[in-house]
Structure formats: C-alpha cells, structure tokens
Amino acid sequence: MPRYLLIESRDPFDSNDTRFCCDLARQLAAANNDVTLFLVQNGVLPVRPGARSADLTSLAGTGVKVLADSFSLKERGIDENRLASGVAAAPLEIVLDALAEGAKVIWH
Amino acid sequence: MKTLSIVESAYRATIEEQDDTIVWIHGAMKGAGADLAVLLRGNAVNYLVQRQDAGGLAFGDWRQTQPPRIASDLAALAAKGVDICYVAEDVADRGIERNELINSAQPVARAAVGELVGRYDRVWYW
Amino acid sequence: MADKKTITIAIMDAPYENARSTTTLRLIDLAAKRGYNINVFAYEGAVLQPFAAQTPHPNAVHGRSVEEENHFIPKDAIAALMREAEKNGGKIDWVNCGLCVDERGAANAIPGVRRGSPADFWQLSEASDNTLVIATR
C-alpha cells in the first residue's frame, strides 16, 4: 500500500491554504493509500479542542492518522493530553521514519 | 525517478532574481536529464498568464534590462518535455480566462490532484 | 544500527527568518544520530546557513554577555551536526547552490560545504533513498 506523509507547517489562522493538505489527504485515503498528516511548527495551533480543530477530527475519521509534533506542542504550551479528538502527539522521528521507508513525503 | 513538483509560491523574489527560481531550477534540472512534471496551484497559476509584463523598473540610474518572463519560461519547459499542469479551479477562482494562458499547460481538477500525485515516484512541494 | 539510509533535503530559507530552519536541523540531527548519509542542497537564502562569518553577540535586553547569551549560530550547529554524523558512521554532504552563493556574497562557508548546482540536487536525489523539499514562502 503506497504510503504518504503530508507535513503541514501552516495554520488556518494565518493561512487559508491549510485546506490543501486536508483535501489531498482525503483524496489519497479514499484511494486506499496509507496517509498520515503531521502537523509541525504553527501547524499545531489548531489542535486545541474547538480551535478550528473540526477539520482535523473529521480527517481522522476517514482513516488518516493525524499527528502533531511534540516539540511544537510543547513550544506553544499545548497540553499533549488535551488535543482535539483524533489528533495525537508524535515525535519528529515520524518524518525520518517515513523518509527512510520510502514514503512520499510532502512539506506544505 | 519521475518527479512531480507542485508549485504554489508566486512572485516571491522574481524581480530580484529576474526569474522565478523554482521554474528556473526545473529548467536547470531538465537540462541535466531530470524526469519532471510541474503542477501549478494557488497563486502560481498566474504564472501561466501570457500578458505578464514586469519590465521597466529602474532604481536611480540602474535599469533592469532582463525582467522575469515567467510564462515564456514555462512554455520553454513544456517544449523541453516537462508536463505543465495547473489546478483548474485556482485559475477560475482568480478570474483568469483559459485563453489568457500559455497553450502548453493542461488543467487538472482540484479533486484529481491526489490521483495525479499517485502517478509519480516523488512529489516535491515548492 | 538500523539500515543505513541516504536522505536528501532541499532547503531555501536564510537563517533567523523562519521556523523551517530549526525543524530542518532537528531532522538532520535525528538522521545524523542514526548514522545516515544526509545530503543538503541549500538553495537561495539557505546558502547563508553555513556562512563562516557569523558571530555571536551579547543580549543587553536580558543583561547577558556574549558567553551567557550563548546565541544560536547556525554555522556552529551545522558543524556540530557534521561531527555527529561522522561519529555515527554517516556523513553530511552540504551543497550550496553556486549562483545563489555568488549573488549573496556567501562564498565564505565552513569546512565541509561545497559549491554545486541544480544538477547536483537532481543527482543527489536520484542516488538517495528519499528526498524532502522544504521550500520557503
């Protein structure tokens, strides 16, 4: 099964283009690909429950793994144990693992 | 490996560089034998508009004699065998008419970007 | 040790302008610890990341001397990562895009940095297990 890691570094408060990764993730998941969305830097800002996290929760419901970089969360004082439903904290190693495994990795 | 470059960034430093540096690097890589395709999305779809004209800038007695000619550069890339595509809705959203664009670019529906991505060994996002 | 991999990363940001630079170094650090071979193609402003003339400074707002401030200096972080990679059986091949170096006057780079071109990026990528492009905005 082809594997994709989409890295979202932008946030919906500052950019109206965060839909790109969500939309692409949905398309790829619907085509039976293994898809992970990894939020990094300000990309983690919407993961507090209710903070425009609905898109992320909805995305997780389609089978896309939605992960948020632990350091980016800590840097912004976001409690790893209080993330929007469907979002989990993860280390940056996730990105290196994906690269090492030959996944298609796209930085947005 | 077949590589798809998705290009979104537009007019970032094009006057200073006298090129779009992403379009430029793809020309250089193609010249080195790379197997490439380009998908323009977001504001970068405006790069396909034929009547862009960045000429005439001067700073004191310094005059820019080689302004960027990005639509021509994309047409040249296409002529070298690089598939140039664009997200059709992004063109429409910006009020651009299809007949304003260079002839050698093909539209891709926003809903088909995933399928396009799946056709390539590598996908780079610029 | 996990299988040795070769990863290529293309970067574009000058230092001190965006969080992408820090995330890139974090990724390189992880790869260096694994003993991977890491190719970095520095394009545009990123050719200044390993610029040898960077110097630290004090921080009067916080009342810190140069030593106390211990300011982050990218070239030193890159040199440390090069050592880390070697220590673990890997290598960082840092290629600065030559024309980008010329127009920025950034030729004075730390040891271990070499001048290259887009053809190098393509060739490095072809010879890698994977490539990540972290473009600027």
Image (spheres, coloured by chain):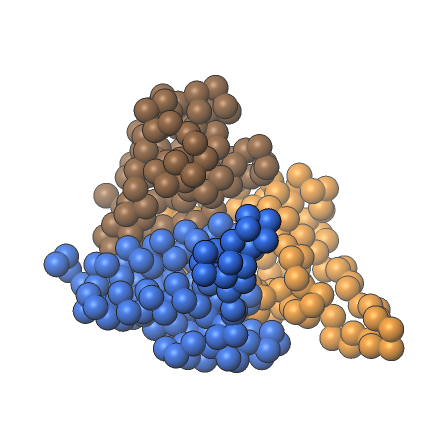
Chain colours: A brown, B orange, C blue
Horizontally, is B13 left or right of C129 in the view? right
Q: Quadrant of residue A15?
A: top right
Q: Quadrant of the N terminus of chain B?
A: bottom left
Horizontally, is B126 left or right of A102 in the view? right
Q: Residue furthest top?
A: A50
Horizontally, is C106 left or right of B62 in the view? left
Task: Report x, y in % for residue A42.
Answer: 49, 39
- Which residue is at the front of the view, A23 or A32? A23
Task: Report x, y in % for residue C121.
Answer: 41, 71
Number of on-image labels: 0
Q: Quadrant of residue B2?
A: bottom left
- Which residue is at the front of the view, C89 or B75? C89
**Picture residue at 30% right of the left edge, 37% below the top:** A90
**Picture residue at 71% right of the left edge, 46% below the top:** B96
- Which residue is at the front of the view, B109 or C31? C31
**Picture residue at 71% right of the left edge, 52% below the top:** B99
Horizontally, is C105 left or right of C3 in the view? right
Task: Report x, y in % for residue C99.
Answer: 56, 78
**Picture residue at 30% right of the left edge, 42% below the top:** A91
